[in-house]
Every structure is written in C-alpha cells, then in structure tokens.
Image (spheres, rainbow, N blue to C red):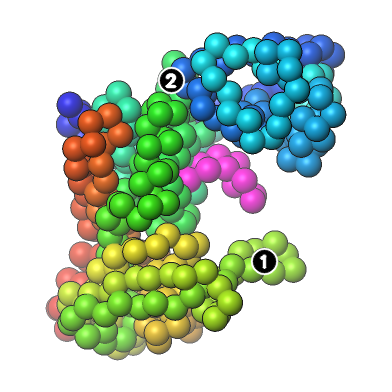
Amino acid sequence: MGVAPHTIGMNKVEYISVTDQADARASRLVKVDEGQEGQRLDNFLAQRLKGVPKSHLYKMIRSGEVRINGGRCAADSRIQLGDQVRIPPVRLGLRPLCAVSAPAIDLSVLWEDEDLLAIDKPTGLAVHGGSGVAHGVIERLRASRPSAKFLELVHRLDRGTSGVLLIAKRRSALVHLHAQLRAGLTDKRYRVIVIGRWPLRSKRINWPLLRTLTATGERMVYVRSDGQSASTILTGLQHVELPALGVVSLVEAKLETGRTHQIRVHCAHAGFPIVGDDRYGDFALNAQAAALGWRRMYLHAWSLQFAHPRNNEILRVEAPQPEGFDRLIAHASSF
C-alpha cells in the first residue's frame, strides 16, 4: 500500500566531500548490498568516486586495478549481492567540508511504498546536480533520508518542467521500470500551454529528433531526418486569449517515445512554441509574458501510468495542474 500524499520539508541540506584522506592512500574492499545488486560496475564506481572522470574509471578497470572477488572484470560487469569490489586509491582534489544551505522548499509526495517514491517536482528545480547546479531533487532527497540505502531517478524532467517525478527505492524496481520505459509500456502525459490556436482534436506528430551540443556544451535538439524516431500525440483542450499575447492553447501531450526535449521541439517545429520556453520558444512573446507575470515554462508532467515492479498491477500517479496554469487561464477569461 502506498502512503497518502504529504510533504517533505527540506529547509537545510548539508553537503560534504565524499572523498576523505584515507580514500586517497589505500585501496578499499566494498561489499555489494541489496541496493547495489545488478548495477553495472562503471556506474557503481561513478557513484563511489564522484568527480573522477569516466575515462579514468575505465582505465582503472582495463588495467585490472578494479576487481570483483579478486578477479578481473569489465566496465559492463553486473555486480551481485555479496560481491567484494576492490576500489584502488584515487587522489582527488579535496573540497573543504562545509555546510551549504539549500533553498527552503517542500516536495509534495504523490505516492510512496517500499519500492517507489513519486513527487510533484516544482518548476525551476533541477532533478540532479551538475552543469552549474549545486544540488537537485535527488541530492536533497538523499540528504533528507540518510538511512535510505537506495534512491535513484527512474526518469528525468527538464529543470523548467514541473510534475510527476518517479524515484526508485530498490535497484530491482529501477531495473523493472527502466525496462518498461525502453519498451514503451508506460503512459506519460503532460499539460502544456502553447502560443497559437491548436485544434481541439488529437494529432500525432512523428518527427525524428537529432540531439547536438553547442560550442558551449549546451544541449540542443532539432527535427532532422537523420535523427531518432520520436512520436507525440497532441490534443487541444482549450483556447483562451491573453492581452499582448493573443490566443494560447491548453494542450495535452502524450509521449510515445521519450527523447530529450521532445515535446518542446515538436511544439515549436509545428509553429506552436510553449509559453516561457527559453530555448525553443518565441523569445519576444516570452518577454511580454514575463512582463505580465507569467515567468515559468508552461510544461507540466501531470500523469504517469506504469506496472508496479513488485506485483505488475497498473498504477497511475497524477500531479494536479499547477496553480500558475489555472491563474493564466482565469486571467485570460476575465477579458
């Protein structure tokens, strides 16, 4: 049974260096527990040796410095419960131990049981640290639940996207859910507000997407014939008119594939950019929307349906449409 919705208060989070002086001087034998069983060796090492480049981890594995139960192994070796993994000494640039105050925030829990945790991620919060972000949802959850042996993201949401975010509390649950995602067996639906009058009917968009990196390392996605297949079903729900912006549409987007920035790029390429999208949107209209107080990206993951990894029963988790969506529509209706 899952628990009733509640909130997790996280007013302060303390982060310290994961590497200490002893780690740099001697090898360690780490015993694999239930939370790590079935993990790839390279991913296991990346979690243990944060900050070490992947290229160095692979070099250590190839050279035989990393061993499982005394034997040589490969990067894609799967570790098993009770295995002894030898981790050689690694010298990292140590950061001073210091407390870091995280912004005050409450994460609304939509569902929780012994295998899964589903939260309603707010807009503007990254799901994990990196790329200039000190900490995200997963780091805050781990800091707030120090006794939890395993907490891993099942999927990701863009920083500006709000809504249902699923976290696995067991590796077996993570593996099961990843298999469903790869096979397209989940039902992921979003609410989005776009510029323009999207028809009040459903339309399937099948445009392949190519992911690239800019010179500054920023991810950009384009509709390209040599890209990966991508399919989105967009259904118009409502038209409203906003002063200075014109007609906007509330749309439901159902993902049939899960490519990076898929909904954002498909909407923009169709000529209906998402309100507030700072990468693929209409920048002039975004500035006008911000001047009126509408400053978020209007993309919300409102529903996720999947087979529960323990009993295969169908579970549907929903995050209510954000207040910002309702206020924008109500504001338009007042004119």
Give me the disc on residue 39.
none
Q: Earlier in the sequence, mark 1 or mark 2?
A: 2
Given residues 182 and 253, the one toward you in this image is 182
Q: Where are the magenta residues, as a range?
A: 127-136
Which amino acid, mark 2?
Ala
Q: Which mark is residue 213?
A: 1
Q: Residue at x 40, y 29 (%)?
A: 172
User: Residue 219 in the image: x percent, y percent?
Assistant: 61, 64
Relative horizontal placement of residue 257, taking residue 203 as reference (left or right): right
Q: Is residue 128 magenta?
A: yes
* Position of the C terminus by quadrant: bottom left
Tell me which residue sits at (29%, 65%) in the image. 254
How far apart marks 1 and 2 lie (CA) works out to: 35 Å
Q: Position of residue 63 (x, y in %)?
A: 84, 29
User: Of all residues shown, which one is farthest toward the left?
Assistant: 334
**Residue highlighted by disc 2:** 148
Q: Residues within 10 Å of mark 2 (few under 14, many from 20)?
A: few
Depth check: give the residue in front, 291 or 324: 324
Most foreground residue, 5 or 235: 235
Q: Indicate the position of residue 180 as horizontal and vertical percent values.
A: 36, 46
Q: Could you tell me which secondary element the residue under label 1 belongs to?
A: strand
Above or below, 317 against 67 in this view is below
- Residue 64 in which image quadrant: top right
Residue type, numbered disc 1: Leu
Residue 280, can we see it? no
Residue beneath the point at 73% across and 17% down: 71
